Amino acid sequence: MDIKSLILQPSDVRFLPIVSAFVKKIGVVEEINRLCPSEKDVSPGHVIMALILDTLSGRSPLYRLERSFKDMDLELLLGVDIEPSKLNDDAVGSALVT
């Protein structure tokens, strides 16, 4: 374990953990992944969950998600520890096409 992982980094997630908990409770990610299996770095269900959170955060465009989530705790919000750069426009496009 490196020292960087031991340092707490604050992130402004506002009310998004509540939305995330509801999305998890109704099984959105699992259902999307069941209907649209994929071998990508980020599952289509997690990309769609990120789109839901991004939309409800008040941000208008549905692109450049990596910028929107760069200072947020994705493990808290999505339930998986992924790099924000993996929520790029290609991942979004691939999830929407699948």
Image (cartoon, rainbow, N blue to C red):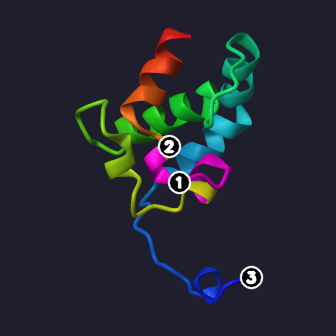
Q: Amino acid at mark 2?
A: Lys
Task: Identify the image quadrant of residue 33.
Answer: top right
The earlier-in-sequence mark between 2 and 3 is 3
User: Mark 3 near mark 1, Cβ–Cβ under 8 Å?
Assistant: no
| Residue 93 horizontal/vertical position (percent) | 42, 20
Reply above or below: 12 against 18.
below
Residue 47 percent location from the top left of the image = 53, 32
- Tell me if mark 1 has few (under 14), some (14-19) or many (20+) residues whose alpha carbon lies within 10 angstroms of its own: some
The reply to whether the C-beta atoms of the residues labelled 1 and 2 are less than 8 Å apart is yes
Magenta highlight range: 76-85
Query: Does label 3 or label 1 sit earlier along the sequence?
Result: 3
Instruction: Please give the name of the residue rendered at 41% of the width and 53% of the height, measured from the top-left corner.
Output: 69
Residue position for label 1: 83
Q: Which residue position holds label 3?
A: 1
Q: Which mark is residue 86?
A: 2
Q: Is residue 66 left or right of residue 29?
A: left
Give the quarter of the figure containing the C terminus.
top right
